[in-house]
Image: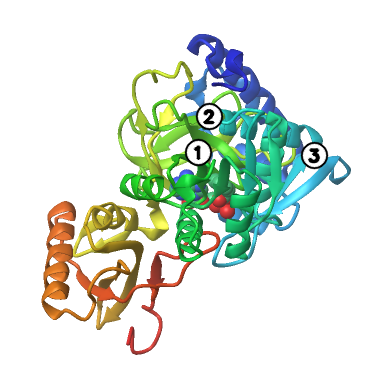
């Protein structure tokens, strides 16, 4: 079901007309209010009034994370601070944090888009939603919270952490929808099992999972463990927070981008030229209605592609494929590009392998070495050398056959890989640590 069917199923020509009008207004707004954009446009010889069609967007300069860093904290806001009612901050692991601001209207839009997200996942006002994304500067908690309330669902603002209490609430409050990262959903399932609670017996039926890359086979693992439908949701602070794109539960095939609010492009990360639909590249967004901090051609560093063709659910918004990973997380193993999520996809298909792994990078001389640490399931006979050797051989062989490059594999004991209550850390980079991994 759609939350705003008249918008989400708009005819394409009406949608493109709306996008063009909104793009014009956005360009005017940033040119008049944000010195950085005025300077960039002037330098590129771009007159915001000259935009005649959506294709003209290719003439616009890109925006990158460093632009936001250099404008820290409020320098890229396009509305006066008196009109800003909320700020969030991005969860970057390196460098200075970036700050994003929302006007009251931005919060309204965000709430609608997150209500769309929950509705697309199959939630209704009858549902009881446990929001386990972190509340705070991270956009996940409050973003999901406002959307669930906007939909009219009963909303439980638990935030992340205290996993046993999460299970308790899941069990006692009649929760039907769980919103958290896929890796935390796994930990909740595992913890429930240890507590003797079978989540499959509970009323829980839908997971609204995102904020980190996860593979199709991870989805199936989680769906089976929890007895639910798991839906992928995508977004980023610089563009909005969650609510940029979402899968529909009917098809679970690609994430519908809320195109009435965001212009989607996929570009070749080297040439920065837009690639044809269906080709893989870096995802770029231009916001069309944001007031607090509009972004023009923001380079997300996320890698995906457009799924061509119409979706059977009736939404007309184009779909992007689940994000494979970030260009920063892409490994180059003897010349072959590999994303951790591709390794995950292979691992999850192998019996005896638990849904917990880490990719450890070290440097041996001038060469980068990759070792995948793979946890075995608790029922696996870890002390049986033969079984261990056989599993080790199989994991290596399957990765090599799927990715066309072989990597070192280390099987590790159950529970030895650190669990996450938010975004999982799949890549451990020890290349700058003296002596490498021990
Ligand atoms: O993670 C917003 C969010 C919250 C999305 C809750 C979904 C659910 P940031 O902390 O700014 O915002 O991180 C954004 O996370 O550029 C992607 O690299 C990654 N990411 C987010 N959703 C997905 C997803 C939030 N479904 C960054 N699949 C993005 C893969 C995702 N990666």
Element on which disc 2 rests: loop
Q: Residue 181 location, x and y as percent?
A: 51, 52
Eye-nearest disc, 3 or 1: 1
Is residue 191 found left or right of 410 in the rendered image? right
Q: Residue at x 24, y 54 (%)?
A: 346
Q: Residue at x 39, y 20 (%)?
A: 311
Residue indicated by mark 2: 122
Determine the image quadrant of residue 376. Answer: bottom left
The way the protein has been coloured in the rendering is rainbow
Q: Residue 364 location, x and y as percent?
A: 25, 82
Q: Residue 67 location, x and y as percent?
A: 61, 52
Q: Residue at x 63, y 47 (%)?
A: 130
Q: From where the camera sits, is residue 154 visible?
A: yes
Is residue 104 found left or right of 307 in the rendered image? right
Sequence order check, earlier mark of 2 and 3: 3
Eye-nearest disc, 1 or 2: 1
How busy is the neighbourhood of tag 2: few (under 14 within 10 Å), some, or many (20 plus)?
Answer: many
In the image, which disc is placed on residue 275?
A: none
Sequence order check, earlier mark of 1 and 2: 2
The foreground one among 195 and 388 is 195
How busy is the neighbourhood of tag 3: few (under 14 within 10 Å), some, or many (20 plus)?
Answer: many
Q: Are marks 1 and 2 in contact (CB under 8 Å)?
A: yes
Residue indicated by mark 3: 79
Residue indicated by mark 1: 205
Alpha carbons under labels 3 and 1: distance apart? 41 Å
């Amino acid at each position: 079901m759609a939350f705003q069917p008249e918008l989400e199923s708009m005819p394409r020509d009406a949608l493109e007309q709306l996008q063009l009008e909104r793009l014009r207004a956005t360009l005017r707004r940033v040119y008049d209010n944000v010195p950085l954009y005025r300077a960039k446009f002037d330098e590129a010889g771009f007159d915001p009034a000259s935009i005649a069609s959506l294709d003209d967007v290719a003439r616009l300069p890109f925006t990158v994370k460093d632009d936001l860093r250099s404008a820290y904290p409020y320098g890229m806001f396009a509305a006066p601070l008196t009109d800003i009612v909320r700020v969030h901050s991005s969860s970057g692991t390196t460098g200075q944090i970036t700050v994003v601001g929302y006007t009251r209207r931005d919060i309204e839009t965000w709430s609608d888009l997150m209500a769309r997200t929950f509705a697309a996942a199959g939630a209704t006002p009858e549902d009881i939603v446990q929001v386990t994304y972190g509340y705070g500067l991270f956009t996940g908690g409050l973003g999901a919270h406002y959307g669930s309330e906007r939909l009219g669902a009963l909303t439980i603002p638990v935030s992340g952490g205290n996993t046993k209490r999460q299970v308790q609430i899941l069990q006692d409050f009649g929760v039907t929808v769980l919103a958290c990262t896929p890796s935390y959903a796994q930990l909740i399932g595992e913890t429930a099992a240890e507590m003797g609670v079978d989540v499959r017996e509970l009323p829980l039926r839908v997971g609204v999972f995102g904020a980190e890359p996860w593979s199709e086979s991870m989805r199936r693992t989680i769906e089976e463990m929890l007895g639910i439908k798991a839906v992928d949701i995508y977004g980023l602070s610089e563009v909005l927070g969650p609510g940029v794109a979402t899968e529909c539960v009917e098809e679970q095939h690609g994430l519908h981008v809320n195109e009435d609010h965001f212009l989607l492009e996929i570009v070749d990360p080297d040439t920065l030229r837009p690639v044809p639909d269906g080709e893989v590249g870096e995802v770029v967004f231009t916001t069309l209605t944001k007031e607090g901090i509009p972004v023009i051609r923001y380079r997300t560093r996320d890698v995906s592609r457009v799924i061509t063709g119409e979706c059977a659910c009736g939404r007309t918004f184009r779909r992007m494929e689940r994000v494979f990973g970030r260009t920063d997380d892409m490994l180059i193993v003897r010349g072959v590009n590999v994303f951790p999520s591709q390794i995950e996809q292979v691992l999850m298909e192998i019996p005896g392998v638990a849904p917990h792994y880490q990719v450890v990078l070290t440097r041996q001389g001038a060469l980068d070495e990759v070792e995948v640490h793979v946890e075995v399931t608790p029922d696996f006979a870890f002390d049986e050398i033969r079984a261990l050797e056989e599993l080790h051989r199989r994991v290596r062989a399957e990765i090599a056959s799927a990715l066309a490059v072989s990597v070192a594999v280390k099987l590790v004991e159950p529970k030895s890989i650190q669990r996450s209550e938010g975004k999982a850390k799949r890549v451990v980079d020890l290349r700058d640590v003296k002596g490498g991994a021990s």
